[in-house]
Image (cartoon, coloured by chain):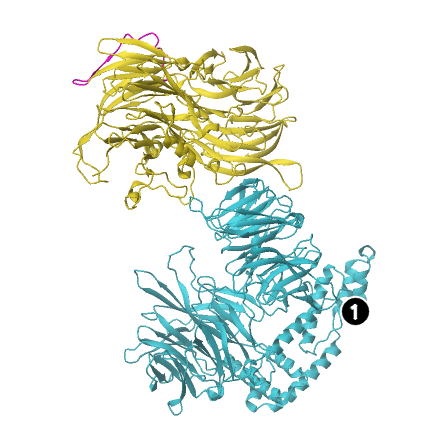
Amino acid sequence: MVEHGEIRVVHRGGSKLTSRDPVFSSDSRFLLCASGECVKVFSTSTEECIHDLRGHTELVTGVLLRPSNHLQVYSCSADGTVRLWDFTDGILIKTYVIGYPIYSIYASANHEGVIFLVTPAQSDKRSEMFQLVAVQLPQSGDQLVEARELSAVLSDVSSNPAAIVFGRGGEYIASANGLQLEVYFFKKQKAYRFPLKEDNKKGGKNTFMCVACHPKDDCIATGHEDGKIRLWRNFNHKKEYTYSTLHWHHSAVSSLCFTPEGTNLLSGGIESVLVQWRYNQESQRDFLPRLGAAITHIAVSPDGALFCTSHSDNKITIIQSCVKVSAVIQGLVKGESVRTDLMMDPRSKSLVLNGKPGHLQFYSLQRDKLLYNLDIVQQEYIHESGLQQFEVVKAAFNASGNWLATVEERKQKAAELELNLKLWAYDEQTQSFVLNTTISAPHEAQITAMCFCHAADSQTTMLASTSKDGHFKAWQLAAQAHTEDEGPSWSCDFVGAYHDLVPECCCFSADGSLLAVSFQEVVTVWSPASWELLTTLSQPPGAIRDLCFGRLSCSKYLLGTSANNLLCCWNLLTCSLEWSTSMDVSLLLADPLSENMAAFCCQAGCTDLFVFKPSEPRPLFSRKEVCSGKVTRAVFAPREEMLESCEESSQWLNHSQLYFLTQYMDLMTFTTKAEEDRLMASSKQLVIDDSVAMTPFYLLLGKHRQQENQDSLGGMSAERTPLPQGSVAIRELLQTPAHVLPSTSYLCSMFVQSLLISVTDTREENKHTEEEMESEKEEEDSEGEMESSTRPKESLESEATESAAPALTKAQARELRRVKKLDHSWLAGLLDS
Amino acid sequence: MGEFKVHRVRFFDYMPSAIRAMAFNSRTERLAVARADGALEIFNFADHYFQEKVIPGQDGRAVEALCWVGQRLFSAGLNGEITEYDLENMRPRYTVEAYGGPIWTISSNSQGTLLAVGCEDGTVKMFELLDERIRFQRNLERQKGRIISLSWHPSGTLIAAGMMDMIRIFDAETGKEMQLDPGVIASKSKEVVVWSIAFLSDHTIVSGDSAGKVQIWDGLTGTLVKTHLVTKWDVLALAVSQDESSLVAGTSEGTVVQFQFIASTVDQQDKEWVRTRTFKNHSHDVRALAHTETAVVSGGMDTQLVVRPLLDKVEKNTQESALRKIAFPHRSLVCCAKKAGLLLFQFPDHLELWRVGESDGLGKPGDSLPVKRNPEKLIQLKRKGEDHICCSALSPCGGWLAYSTVSAVRLYRIQYNNISITKVSKLPKDLRSAHQLCFSSDSSKLFASSSHSSVVIVSLNQLECKHLHTLKPRSGESRPVHLLFASEDGKWLAAANADCEIHVYNLHKLKLHCTVPVHSSCPTAIAIHPVTSNLVVVHADQQIFEYSLMQKEYTEWSRKLQKQGLHSLWLERDTPVTHISYSPKNPAHIFLHDMFMFCIIDQSLPLPEAKTMLYNQMTLRSLPEPERIRHSHAFKISLPLCLLEDHSLVVVERPLLDIMSQLPAPVRQKKFAT
């Protein structure tokens, strides 16, 4: 098999933000959260992600501010390391190798140089036992430090990070596990255990869910499965401990948190209501309801002004003093299942899938940020269990991304199925999709598949849909005859059927000249131009599961997987079976940018991945046990910038990345070592120059400069303006005390002048790039030249970027040119339409 | 072939009365409980919470507050009188009119020299405690509103009074108002009643009011320290533990809220009152509370007395750590005429005589038989006078009926051919009042336990009632007799008194036969075996003794039982055995029952091992080896139980649910998901 040593399956983009509780920086300007294999630093005011702290190779399981230095943060991971970061600059300071998977991390100011970690009990790695260990961090100048001196503090603790907490000033630590609360006093080295009865008479479940300690008083708050909160006091006595009970939540309390002064206790649970209890006056409560989804974690900023709640829908809400939601950091919403497939929006290169109920979410994987939600159903969603509501079940983009087709359905118990096919046009002005046509009841039964014709040069866009009613329909955009003012809308062009069989999948060939529709075990190939049945292909037994046309050089091939564990490849020129192989393919996928196809095979509870070219018998890449369970959703996401990997096994990752959803709804992808190294390098480079003073100007200037930095990183040589603060006028303005400055009106002209860029410089540089472009063009074929005259400015710029890249190998240059050609073609299509 | 034919009697609609006030005497460990009908009950907490004494109520006497002064017990009520009780003879000793309108509260200083009462007219009246009486001393400065609650400072110099909308502190010596009131509690919209108040030794005043708040005040400066909103309704009662580290508040919602005096951080000394636990054992208002060393005792509208142990003060999983609910009196209110099949039910203000129903008597064990003749109520006898009925008895032949109040004994003759009842007018003078009444088995004699532990014997026949003899124990002590049992053969009479003594008299010789060795716990039921003349005694601590009257010593069986010890499941029961009877078929069988169960002891079988389980009859049937002590849980709550002549068993049941359903509706509470 193929060597795959350096390709790893990683979490990148769209990972859970809410697996661990977020941490506020001490000035509450930043919020740090564990997200997949990195720690993300968000700005609390703008919701933007400022850095990714990358370095861990497994899921990050804890983030903790270093008690002795509030500008540094510890993170721990299941890869057995604890890393220390400078989170303002995003620099990895130190790596401590512990050697055991770590599940959570704790520290207190009282314990200098010691961190407390939850690791599996060493005696038996298989068992579900965890222990809390103290690790003395060695003082060493090295980057990589081995810290193997572990001393157990508490045995048998919960792996839930919310179940352990340090008490007032770090004098004791409280740990709840199951039905027992344990308090360990460090000074006395004595532990007190307080068990609860398994079940009280009224049926309440007493299991501990979370623990919080009052910062000033000796009071421990515990949340329980039946929604009760207990406040424990006097717990330094074996018998005379006492607790009071607060009860508002109707089901488990998932998070508890005291405010920094200890005046309030915050609690949250599935009710998605943040409850604020007055400490010592617990009958007074404040509520912040309608937070959208169940609360999983609560954090409070050190000044107590900001609260932050994590929610089960991968959202972090920042709340100002329990009154107002000031910011929402939304991750990729992954519900129970993804009804629509994973798709890429060709325009924004973002991942599109079901989001909030009745919405499609557009998620940028590169920026790891939710771009926006598109309301498809356009009806109020009612939060009530058992209520059948409209759901988006299918969605498809056309090749240019200016048409979006969606299908929503509602299945009520007694009533008939309600179906709507909606077609959305992209509006350049509003930069969003606008509903163009709604076709109610496009089919009589559920729609099984839907796809757009991907041919870039076709005059009209075509949509094919197949349904369980035995028909497939082709829809076409046509100008309405009688109403001129409304513009073109979609209507049905053709209704096809085959022997009363139910169509399952449909697929357009790359050039749009063929439409393949599978009717159980028969594949029919139609010509969309004349709607005649060209041929039928069949490989019984077993119904067809997936159909896929080959791309580019392999466009003569049609691939299909059948329920009978068969992967078939038909040659459409000979209309014969080229090859077939026996494998249980759960998902077959074509890379739109290359000939490559990916097949996920489910074997013995695990999923294997094969990447192959239809024309070649040998797979390019194969990987056993990619993840456990069946993979049913995956997508090839085109890369923003191509990788330059020459290695055979990783070449398939050059153009696009393969993302897939595991059965636990984790979004995973494949990455090469080179790519990881590059990411690591880029994250380290970002160092802010400290010489700039923090003035209002700084924001203006600093931003400008950063932009420039990026430009220079991208290799752009154009428009190198002299640094504004380099000019004498600015320096004078910035450094002279305000009261000795002349009047602003006098200064203004001088200031503006200083900002102007000298004309000669720019022109020269522009000329330089233009020259380069010219030479590039000469190499292109005539067709490309024709179009280049009408090229929009953006593409020109991007091309310039590429052309300016230093030292391209010959092969790469050729590749580059080919990509450019592709670009031109879709641009042409855009212009034509 | 069932062993017994069982009459399940459900027509005794006994209704206990609501608990109004409570006072705990920590020295003697006695709890005095006053009920809404004026009855007073004394529970001995040292002796398994046994209801030692019951002083019946009186029309027009409503006890609002209780107060122990040493061994003396005082009560005050809305009739404006202060009553001291004679606990020896179980009757009010005297009453003193306070002349201040209805009295809301009574409280004595810790020295036991002064008694303060709070009256409707706004005065706090001080009474001096003399040896035999109390004497009015003076009024404290008169206030505008009524005085609802009073609390003495432990030093005895200051007294805090809770009134409508405010709390005032008085100097007990000068009677002057010491300071400005520690704040006006009133909310703007409605009047606030300070239902309860507690003055702690560190000059902290704790108040519970009708706005549902427990407030903590600094008594020196008169400033509010903290407010705990405990309920939407009223906080009716407060009780403080002896060491002032814990405080409980009873609310109208039926909850009892505990506050504890806790240091906020582990090492620090300054403590504060923190609300901790909430107990919900009542469905209605908690009107009265007592805080003992180890438990919180609460009672209220729902008539139950609940002893809730504080788990931090008692050993876990012991008898002390169990929650106790005392719902029924620890004595029999039912009397059964064995030969006639009649039942006499005793209510505070009347008696009911019923004839039990009949059926064909054929059926499989466990079947319920069809009733051929319905039970019928023969007589309802209203008591005369304003004192409530204290005890009653029905002769075995059913021809005689007697009852006693605090002031008089009445005897009636009943004819059944056309039901008529005639009062026996001439009763001997010695028979003035009785604590316990009992007829001899041939219905020819009436035994009445009178004052000073004496038993008066009255012979009955159609023509006249004649005083035969007065039996007196040798020593001169004067505890009231609360149990009497005349043996079947008419030779013996056993009398047990509250001092745990049991005297056995020989009725032929009319003199004391012997005194059973004194056990530390109070006897709850006694019986003499009809054949062997052995006396069986069951005590409040669940111990069983058998004493041979012939040999004047414990029987062999009793010694064996004591040596081996009783089964732990038997000892864990929390209601005392209230009745003992014997099987006429099998002399080795002893029947015992308490509130919740009925059991048969077979003396011929070996004693159970400590580890064996006690089974009820259904599971027992499947077992090859019969157990020594057999429990039958077939009956829900059987108040008293008697054996009739024809081997049928009468079980009088009073399900708790029926009592609950007769209570007024509790305060409305929002319940989640309703």
Q: With B85 as the anchor, is A657 left or right in this view?
A: right
Query: What x and y, as percent, mark residue B249?
Result: 51, 32
Chain B appears in which tint? yellow
Above or below residue A785? Residue A32 is above
Q: Nearer the viewer, residue B172 or B525?
A: B525
Q: Could you tell me the amino acid type at mark 1? A: Gly
The single residue placed furthest to the bottom in the displayed view is A574
Which residues are the magenta region?
A: B416-435
Can I make out residue A480 in this image?
Answer: no
Q: Is residue B111 above or below residue B648?
A: above
The residue to which callout 1 is attached is A726
- Left or right, residue B2 beside residue A101: left
Circle 1 Cα neighbour tier, 10 Å, few/some/many (<14 / 14–19 / ≥20)? few
Residue sitting nearer the eye, A367 or A24: A24
Q: Please give the name of the residue rendered at 49% of the width and 56% of the height, measured from the top-left corner.
A: A293
In the foreground, B610 or A567: B610
Label 1 residue SS:
helix
**Is residue B426 one of those drawn in magenta?**
yes
Q: Position of residue A733 (x, y in %)?
A: 79, 62
Q: Position of residue A822 (x, y in %)?
A: 53, 84
Say if the magenta span includes residue B137.
Answer: no
Give the image location of residue A126, x and y in percent. Answer: 52, 65
Q: Is residue B353 above or below residue A758?
A: above
Please report, as a chain letter, where disc 1 is located.
A
Q: Which quadrant does the N terminus of chain B fall into?
A: top left
Tell me the shade of chain A: cyan
Quarter-of-image position of residue A60? bottom right
Count of number-bearing discs: 1
Residue at image x 48%, y 53%? A270
